[in-house]
Amino acid sequence: MNGFRTNILRTLPFRRSRLNRRDLGNVACGLPKELQLIVSEKQANSPLKTQELNAVLSFVRRTNHSLTIKQRATLIQALHRRDAHRDVLTVAKSALFEPNQNFRDNVSAIELKKFFASLIAMGKTMQLAQSMFQMIRQFSLTRKSMVFGVINATFTEASLCLGVSESLLIWVKFHKFLEGHADFTSYENDKAQLKTLLFFLRAHKLDATAVRESLDLIDKTQGPLTASQFASTLMYLTSYNREFALTETVWDFKKDKKHPIKSSDLTQICKAYCHFQKYSLVEPVHLQHPEAHDDDSQFDYLLVAHAKQQDWQSLQNQFHALFGIGELPSIAHYGIVMFSVACLGEKEMVDKLYRQLLGRKMIPTLPVLQALLLVHYKRGDYSGCFEHFELFTKYGIKPTASSCQIMLRVYRNLSDIDGALRFLKKMTDSKVEIAERHFATIIGTCAKTTNHAIAEELFQVMKSYYNIEPTGTSVAALSQVYIESSMPQYALKLFKEYCGTGRVLERGIAVYNKAAEAYMRMGRVDMSGKIFEDVLSKNLPADSEFYAVMLKYLSIYKRDFETADGVLEQLLHHSDLKASPSHFEVLMEANDKISNHGGVLRLYQKILDNNVPVNSKILYYLIKATFMMKLQSKENLDEAIGFVEDIMSRSANRALDITFEKLHPSVMAWPMRAAAKFYSPLKAIELMNKYNELFFDKSDSAASNLVVLRSLLVLSAEVHQWDDFQKLYERYMEKLHFYKSQPSAIVPNKKLASSLRGVLPYKVKHLVATDRVTEIPQLLKEITAKNFVIDNEAWNEAIMSVFADKRTIDYGLQSVDSMLIHGFNLVHKFRLLRKNAAANTSTDRNSWFLERKRQDPSSFQPRLYLKSTVHEKIAQAMDTYLCSLADIEAELERLTSHYKYFMKSYLMSPRTKIPGWDDIELRHASYLSKLRNGKKALHEPF
């Protein structure tokens, strides 16, 4: 990414000033001593006395031709710093100008900036314009970068002293004289002209009145042509800043004045109408101005408008009717209809129309290609997206911002940050209009890979290089990256920066949502509640995500299901917002966490009652709840498996009201594993084959997905097909290595860290089954070195296996002693105290430990601990191991010295299965009595 940013920033028109302030401070010694005192910092904020001014003028005139740039600049800057603006103009007349009133050829930018600033301070606007025009005439060809710098600095100075209208008039005058016009509608091409004006508009937050007054003043003083040109510039920049109300204001001005409409104007008004959901206005305004149709990006907004307001069936009927009345559809008809049905995900219809127009020897247009790209994306056919995006090059059509956004979403869904960055570079090179939504999508990809470093870099590049002002969209996207990366404190820092200063941020509610979620991740549920109160007190417009976060707060963190159900009910009857699958998903997750499977099924019934579509996650919880209820009641799984098959078929045939185009592999992975473990591995294979047949082409396969690969690993292990398991395991690890070795993987992907959860226990079983127990310690070391999480299930499986073999028992002892026995003791302490408290035992009823657990159930919850069943088995394995030794007591002495915590637990009861143990008890009675009475590990030898 550093290379990516370097390549991008290398093109910036950024040059250092020839003379900076530090240089000026070091050159005072080049002046006579009496002048050094005059220009010193101590004399600041006081105009020159007559005697001082005469001394300065005498020096300047006496050394006219030998006066250096540094000496001149020092004098001019010092006088300006003293607010001696009249003296600046007097000295500049001799120091900066030739006798013919031209500027000296070696005049510096710093001198000119201070000279023009003094003219502004003195209110000499006519002289300012004359001098500026003189500078432009002299240096626009030879020193253009300096000219831009001086003009922009002067405009900034004017904006501090003059009103909005007067400042904008100055900008128009200067740039019109320099370029011959005031029409700049491409930030990529006109950055030097637009950057300072863009910052001016952001700083002043103009309203409609100020904009109209400014345009009227320019129209009155500079003429209608210049006013029309600058109106186009303003339309472009207000749209760039997403100040669409002002975009409409400028459009109305141009229409009222009957100024000519250019393509950029039409594009921006279409964009504004779509933003305000005025879809019915887009097509009429586009048809009214055929002379402005040479910007392909207008089709993005035209197609969206068609898709948002058309009656699909009537549209198709109208299209087919053209064949019956003898007027064949034009390519424009094809484009509109294809895009409209593409929005529904009707891939077969879009493909059929595409073949039809090719058969009529028609050349595809932008709407046609856009429709092909969209429909393949909506159906989850990402390889088809890449294939059809190449058609833009084939037919010589420039992709639009919306086309590129679809491709960025493809990269996001594939978690391919490297591909997304390469695509962004391609967009920049081809000069596609890059907007905040593009960056938000790429940053969202970073959330899927927990790559906060790349996300931060992208956010800065968006602001600094592309000059896109962040709104809640991109700030929330970066916040989500921090949350997914287990860095919620950074998300809160963003919240305070963008929402904690009283400033109004567009879509600010999105940042409040992330702040509430960040506090939840930190366990600060009380602060999440304050965020919600803040939103309500400020009357911020709540969005759909706000309700999802609130439901998560109530159900998952507060366990207040009654209130959560009430909030969901309010949402179902909301006048503006609609309950979405994500709201039900949150409540289903909360019910799943507490194994309330009946609650999941009731929520699904409410989904059906309210005609809410379902997503893959909802189907996952539904299928899991169905299976678990059957397993708990020890019923046959035939009905549950039939239910899964029915969901697959209805999803594939679109007979189910769904939000997705391809059933996610994780939905199928869970029932596959359940069927393999508790029913029939053969049935699990049948489910897998049916899923592949319904949702994947022959050239593709679900088995390339990590989730499905993991399920296949479980499947092969359950049927003890260890050769197949090994091949799948190698593929699985290769895929993980591929993701972790990508150029963008400069920080670990925390989501990949848990990829071996549920897989590693089977790998341990595989090594045991193939008589390779001695490889288990090395396997665990390698997994740890690769930063994968080894969960409790895997550790317990590994410990049982290594304890069963003399060659590896020491590794097991060391692992239990250092990691697992402490958690085992904590779990059993809690169980014992709770049992005693229930029996009204006076000693432990008010235990500090129990009180802490009551206040915070998640406290003292060990991540790793030895299971009770495993503890019993390794104790038996220790008995067997000691029985095989000639000198048991010597080994016990070694073990209690090296593994005192586990051995304390092991020796708490007599080992009656070891021959001669009674004699050992007698010889070491003092040690064993002290150990068992104190219930603590002893540091003295056995």
Image: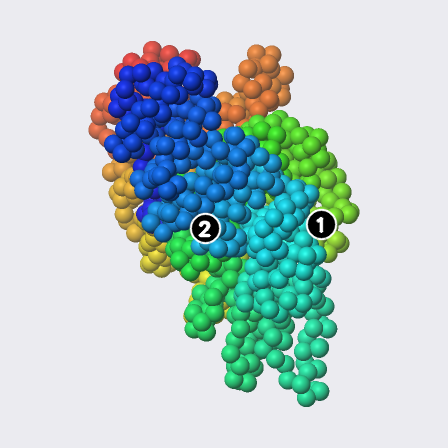
Query: Badge 1 is on which residue?
Result: 578
Q: Position of residue 450 (x, y in %)?
A: 44, 42
Bin the neighbour count of mark 2 within 10 Å (Cα to Cα): few under 14, some 14-19, many 20 and up.
many
Looking at the rendered structure, the secondary structure element under dot 2 is helix
Q: Nearer the viewer, residue 176 or 323?
A: 176
What is the CA distance from the residue labelled 2 to the residue labelled 1? Answer: 54 Å
Looking at the rendered structure, the secondary structure element under dot 1 is loop
Q: Position of residue 878 (x, y in %)?
A: 33, 31
Q: Position of residue 462 (x, y in %)?
A: 46, 45
Vertical placement of residue 390 versus 752, above or below: below
Q: Quadrant of residue 912?
A: top left
Can the viewer see residue 698 in this picture? no
Q: Is residue 124 left or right of residue 709?
A: right
Q: Position of residue 591 (x, y in %)?
A: 64, 41
The residue drawn where x is 47% and y is 38% is: 154
The residue drawn where x is 60% and y is 75% is: 332
The residue drawn where x is 72% and y is 48% is: 577
Q: Quadrant of residue 80?
A: top left
Query: Badge 2 is on which residue?
Result: 178
Can the viewer see residue 293 in this picture? yes
Q: Is residue 670 left or right of residue 74?
A: right
Amino acid type indicated by mark 1: Lys
Q: Earlier in the sequence, mark 2 or mark 1?
A: 2
Amino acid type indicated by mark 2: Leu
